[in-house]
Image: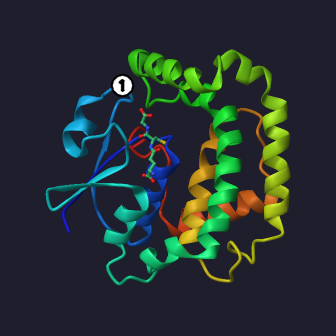
């Protein structure tokens, strides 16, 4: 398979795909797009949304649809999985966690090497339209942290040692992808069990967050 991934480093949906690629040990060409590049994604799929994966020259978006293509033996039966109760419940948790993780982490993500001056300003302006000024988000970091920790402490009890399971699976990719960006936040401390879990998922998926910058 000839694979070319267009992604943002901070984006949890892009991380999903990178984790799946690592899990299946599939080599791919990686392109981190600047967040202010509207032309490339629109030209490829008609929308400014990543991840986008070119498979044998054809562009695909939607992280789970992309992963379905990568799952050549259909071990995760993604079409059925998307219709099931487990996915529904996990999506609910990810939406709640994701909102708090984004509010807490976004003001810090923009100072990672994926951003330059222009893409930083573009990202901040776009996100502030929905969330309000980043400086106010930073002021509220204690509240976001507490809300995240409440979910993570509950989650600790649900790891067996993987999410609701003794074996690693797609749920773990979805969950870990949404939490990974918290490692960028100064002073955020994961509950020990969650940190250990995330490191396990990272190893299973041969995942390296800043791979494109720290080669
Ligand atoms: N449902 C999509 C969601 C992808 C998504 O929301 N991507 C965001 C980044 S996290 C994006 O590309 N946003 C572009 C923008 O808002 O300018 C998937 O699963 O791939």
Q: Is residue 118 above or below residue 113?
A: above
Of residues 89 and 67, the one nearer the viewer is 89
Figure colour scheme: rainbow
Residue in the image at 43% along x and 15% along y: 117
Which residue is found at the position 29% from the left and 63% from the top?
Answer: 27
Q: Residue at x 78, y 71 (%)?
A: 158
Corner quadrant of residue 55: bottom left
Q: Secondary structure beneath disc 1? A: loop
Residue 213 drawn above or below residue 87:
above
Give the residue at the far left of this rendering. Answer: 57
Q: Residue furthest front?
A: 83
Residue 167 visible, this orientation: yes
- Residue 39 figure quarter: top left
Does residue 38 sit above or below 200 in this rendering?
Answer: above
Q: Residues within 10 Å of mark 1 (few under 14, many from 20)?
A: some
- Which residue matches tag 1? 36
Q: Is residue 65 left or right of residue 40?
A: right
Q: Is residue 191 visible?
A: no
């Amino acid at each position: 398979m000839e694979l070319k991934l267009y992604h943002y480093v901070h984006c949890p949906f892009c991380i999903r795909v990178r984790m799946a690629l690592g899990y299946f040990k599939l080599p791919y060409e990686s392109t981190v797009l600047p967040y202010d590049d509207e032309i490339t994604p629109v030209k490829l799929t008609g929308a400014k949304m990543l991840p986008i994966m070119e498979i044998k020259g054809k562009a695909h978006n939607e992280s789970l649809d992309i992963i379905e293509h990568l799952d050549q033996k259909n071990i995760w039966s993604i079409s059925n999985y998307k219709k099931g109760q487990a996915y529904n419940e996990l999506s609910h948790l990810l939406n709640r966690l994701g909102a708090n993780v984004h509010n807490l982490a976004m003001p810090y993500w923009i100072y990672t090497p994926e951003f330059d001056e222009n893409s930083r300003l573009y990202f901040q302006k776009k996100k502030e339209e929905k969330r309000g000024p980043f400086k106010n988000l930073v002021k509220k970091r204690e509240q976001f942290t507490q809300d995240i920790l409440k979910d993570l402490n509950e989650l600790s009890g649900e790891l067996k040692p993987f999410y609701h399971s003794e074996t690693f699976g797609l749920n773990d990719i979805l969950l870990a992808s949404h939490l990974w960006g918290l490692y960028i936040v100064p002073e955020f401390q994961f509950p020990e069990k969650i940190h250990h879990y995330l490191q396990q998922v990272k190893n299973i998926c041969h995942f390296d967050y800043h791979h494109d910058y720290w080669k």
